[in-house]
Amino acid sequence: PLAGVLVTVAGATPAIIERVGARPTLVGSLVVLAAGLVWLSFASSDAQFSQQVLGPSLLIGLGLGGAFVTTTQLSVDGVED
């Protein structure tokens, strides 16, 4: 599920960047990623996947997909072909 969300969000991120800008997209992505990581940190060692791991994994995928694409776009911004 994490990889599926990551790929889906990565495909949609350029349109989001065009609409709201790179900085808000990156900040939002990193906040969502951090929220997923914090949520996952509360899972116990015998956690049920569907109850305690799936939700945080989806948030992590959402944040990673947005952050990877945004940082890549920012790193090549202004570079000539």
Image (spheres, rainbow, N blue to C red):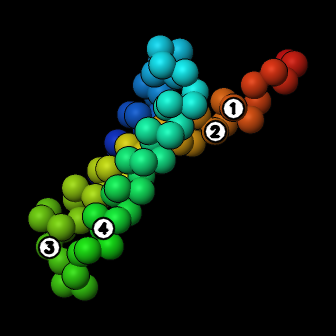
Which residue is the site of mark 1? 74
Tell me if label 4 and label 3 are in contact, CB under 8 Å.
no
Percent x, y for residue 3? Answer: 39, 49
For label 4, the SS is: helix
| Coordinates of residue 68 in the picture (x, y in percent) | 57, 42
| Pointers 2 and 3 in contact (C-beta within 8 Å) | no
Question: Which type of secondary structure does the marked residue at label 2 adopt?
Answer: helix
- Circles 1 and 2: CB distance less than 8 Å? yes
Q: Which mark is residue 10?
A: none
Q: Secondary structure at mark 3?
A: loop
Amino acid tagged 4 = Leu
What residue is pinned by disc 4?
40
Taking the spot 32% from the left edge, 73% from the top edge, the residue there is 41
Q: CA distance from mark 1 to mark 2?
A: 5 Å
As measured in the structure, the alpha-carbon distance from the residue carrying label 4 to the one carrying label 2 is 24 Å
| Residue identifier under label 3 | 48
Name the residue: 42% across, 48% down.
Answer: 31
Q: Give the residue at mark 2.
A: 71
Mark 4 and mark 2 lie on one chain; the one further toward the N terminus is 4
Of badges 2 and 3, nearer the viewer stands 2
The amino acid at mark 3 is: Gln
- Residue farthest to the bottom? 45
Please tell me whether mark 1 sits on a helix, a strand or a loop: helix
Q: How far apart, in angstroms, are the residues tagged by discs 2 and 3?
A: 33 Å
The residue shown at (25%, 85%) is 45
First in residue order: circle 4 vs circle 3:
4
Query: Can the viewer see residue 2 in this picture?
Result: no
Tell me which label, 2 or 3, sits earlier in the chain.
Answer: 3
Question: Badge 4, how many Cα within 10 Å: few under 14, some, many 20+?
Answer: some
